[in-house]
Image (cartoon, rainbow, N blue to C red):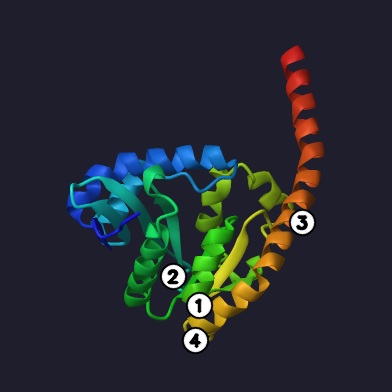
Amino acid sequence: MDNSSIDIRTATVADVQYASTITAEMESSAKVRGTGIAKRSSDYVAKKITEGKAVIAVTKKGEWVGFCYIEAWGHDAFVANSGLIVSPPFRKSGVAKKIKENIFELSKSMYPHAKIFGLTTGLAVMKINSDLGYEPVTYSELTDDDQFWAGCKSCVNYDILISKNRKNCMCTAMLYDPADHYEPAETAEDFEKHSKLYERFMRLKQSKFLGFLKPLQKVKAHLFTVLNFY
């Protein structure tokens, strides 16, 4: 798809009109994938837009294309680029990568000393992050801000996260540390070399946690039956 007709930029107050469309697509996309992202209200998205902490993509005709926003945690020591979403007709067009590049640069400009991190289950997002200089890390290297982790409550995998004491889950953690990071070209080459390992790792990770989840679901179903009986 030709992206020359798409404008990717820092969102402005005029873009608040797209907030409800963005949140509706976030929720719809999460259901289709079967994995959750922190659910956000249209008011929350509108707030990020008015604060200048978001990047939006729209066509020259004003059609919404994609979105991503910035969240700061731990007294601005950590920054997350959250809620990356692209309208279905524009997916696999390179728009997501452009949005990520823009929000990454905006994050570094607004929070030059912060560590930028993300959680994802998607190999494509891992590849984009790697191109930007992110590295896979353990959850212990992310923010310990309870408000951030509370945002995971709307995720279908939240029970797994809690059972693991927030040390692991279905998502892979990636981090960009401005004080200590690889050059993007180096990480991109390394990612390409080991992408098959990532794929196998994710399949193994999902298989392991699904095996853990099935007994838990059976217990929940039994409790539901008992409670309904009484």
Spatial CA distance of label 3 from label 4 is: 32 Å
Q: Nearer the viewer, mark 4 or mark 2?
A: 4
Circle 1: residue type: Gly
SS at badge 3? helix
Residue receiving disc 2 = 75
In front: label 3 or label 2: 3
Q: Are marks 3 and 2 in contact (CB under 8 Å)?
A: no
Q: Of marks 1 and 3, which one's residue comes earlier in the chain?
A: 1
Left/right placement of residue 198 relative to residue 223 reads left
Taking the view exactly as shown, the residue that stands out farthest to the front is: 1
Q: CA distance from mark 1 to mark 2?
A: 23 Å
Nearer the N terminus, badge 1 or badge 2? Answer: 2
Disc 4 is placed on an element classified as loop
Name the mark on residue 204. Answer: 3
Q: Position of residue 76 (x, y in %)?
A: 42, 71
Between circles 3 and 4, the one closer to the viewer is 3
- The residue under the point 50% across, 48% down is 38
Residue at 56 percent across and 42 percent down: it is: 33
Mark 1 closeness class: few <14, some 14–19, many ≥20 residues within 10 Å = many
Taking the image as shown, residue 169 lies to the left or right of residue 215, namely left
Amino acid at the residue labelled 2: His
Q: Which residue is mark 1?
A: 133
Residue occupying image coordinates x 62% and y 71%: 136
Give the labeled residue for mark 4: 179
On the image, the x and y values in percent for residue 214 come to 79, 38
CA distance separating discs 1 and 4? 12 Å
Residue at 75%, 26% in the rendered image: 221
Q: For the residues carrying marks 1 and 4, which lies nearer the camera in this image?
A: 1
